[in-house]
Image (cartoon, rainbow, N blue to C red):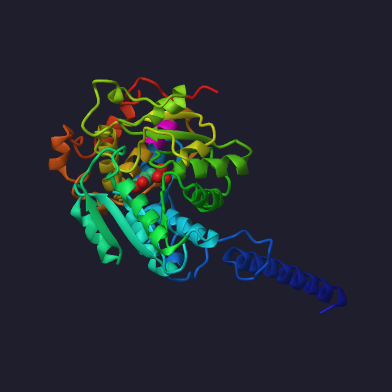
Amino acid sequence: MSRQQHGVTCLVFAAAAAVLYIRLRRAAQTRGEDGSSESEPVPRCIGDGVLGAIGNTPLVRIASLSAATGCEVYAKAEFCNPGGSVKDRVAVRMLRDALDSGALRAGGLVTEGTAGSTGISLALVAPALGVRCHIVMPDDVASEKSATISALGASVQRVRPVSITHPEHFVNVARRLAAEECSAHGHGAAFFADQFENTSNYKAHVDTTGPEIWRQTGGKVHAFVAGAGTGGTLAGVASYLKRVSGAKVACYLADPPGSGLYNAVMRGVFYDSVEAEGKRLRHPADTIVEGVGINRRTANWALCPQLQGAFRVTDAEAVAMARHLRHADGLWVGSSAAVNCVGALRVAQALGKGHTIVTVLCDGGSRHVSRFWDDAVLQQHGLQPPPRGTELDSLLTHRAVTQGEVGRAPN
Ligand SMILES: Cc1ncc(COP(=O)(O)O)c(C=O)c1O
């Protein structure tokens, strides 16, 4: 080999070694193994117990909705959390913040008044954080829920359903119990989690759900849409995405029947026509959808930045979307996730082709077998799923949202 050939060979080897080094270093950074501070925070492969399994959920592409709209429609698969819902993130954050601030001490008691997923999530994470858990719920809630919470080791108190203004309402009972425990055993003996007014809920989404969406889309997200129950998810994710994108990500509300939020976004007042004087239904939100829709300004909702619009979603649309997702995409979701996906469809239709839209699959279908996924119950609500295979067409042609408005909020 001539000296010149030798020089070229050396150069080629050096270049190849440099490329290999850069590739290996990038791979290590992606896996978070090299401890370098410049690497993006990435999901850890190994987490501590149940707490380490919360969050970093997959972002799934919904192929059927993407194909139908010419957009990329993605959703956070929150049913992958160990407690089966988005509320795991909130439960762990509320308890950690309470323990850090001294509002709750080790071995103390967390109480919450809830008929939903938050009770299950609190019961799940409480032992891992060294606290006890007591959940108060109305006695007309499906018995699987109280059985699950008991099986997780928490105590459950079922009380008769009364108005929120009544001292025996389940939320008021949970609050009083924590106060009584503190008067008997001192500050920090018990903590009322209060997911509606406790802004640790919002912070959980600012610090986890929002950054995950940004990272998983590589910052290529045009819009986010979700319903609101406490408002924590929408307010937290919207706040983060707006901040990190310089307000470029458009954020929208998807609202079920009976909720006052649509009007809060579109007209600045909490009001729904079913709430009008003399028209009030037995249940303020007489809808098959559970978990989303509110009629008051919670502390978490109050942190929501200005939204670009809102979409009303009917029960029939939620049912059609859930049935469609099950057979077209293999996604078996709960009612609030179905509302969110109708919202994603409406946002895609409003923005037009070429946009990336993200929403949240709050929980899976298994928690809704006895209601939302029971055709006999749907029938009692005057609901009939469209024939199999026609659901998406029915949703696409029914573009005009119930109230005839494709919601763009006033600035
Ligand atoms: C099943 C389900 N989906 C959605 C939500 C709404 O989320 P957020 O409370 O963050 O508004 C809730 C809230 O309780 C819920 O239980």
Q: What stretch is highlighted in magenta?
A: 343-348
Is residue 273 shown above or below 112?
Answer: above
Q: Is 241 or 184 nearer to us in this picture?
A: 184
Q: In which quarter of the image is residue 247?
A: top right
Q: Is 67 or 299 nearer to us in this picture?
A: 299
In percent of width and height, residue 90 lies at 44, 53
In percent of width and height, residue 83 lies at 35, 59
Q: For the view shown, which residue lies furthest in the bottom direction?
A: 1
For the C terminus, the quadrant is top right
Judge from the rendering whether residue 3 lies leftward or rightward of residue 381; answer left or right. Answer: right
Identify the residue at horizontal 68%, vertical 63% (top origin): 37
**For residue 6: magenta?**
no
Q: Can residue 83 be seen in this view?
A: no
Judge from the rendering whether residue 280 lies leftward or rightward of residue 99; answer left or right. Answer: left
Q: In which quarter of the image is ligand 1?
A: top left
In percent of width and height, residue 89 lies at 44, 55
Q: Is 393 or 224 nearer to us in this picture?
A: 224
For the N terminus, the quadrant is bottom right
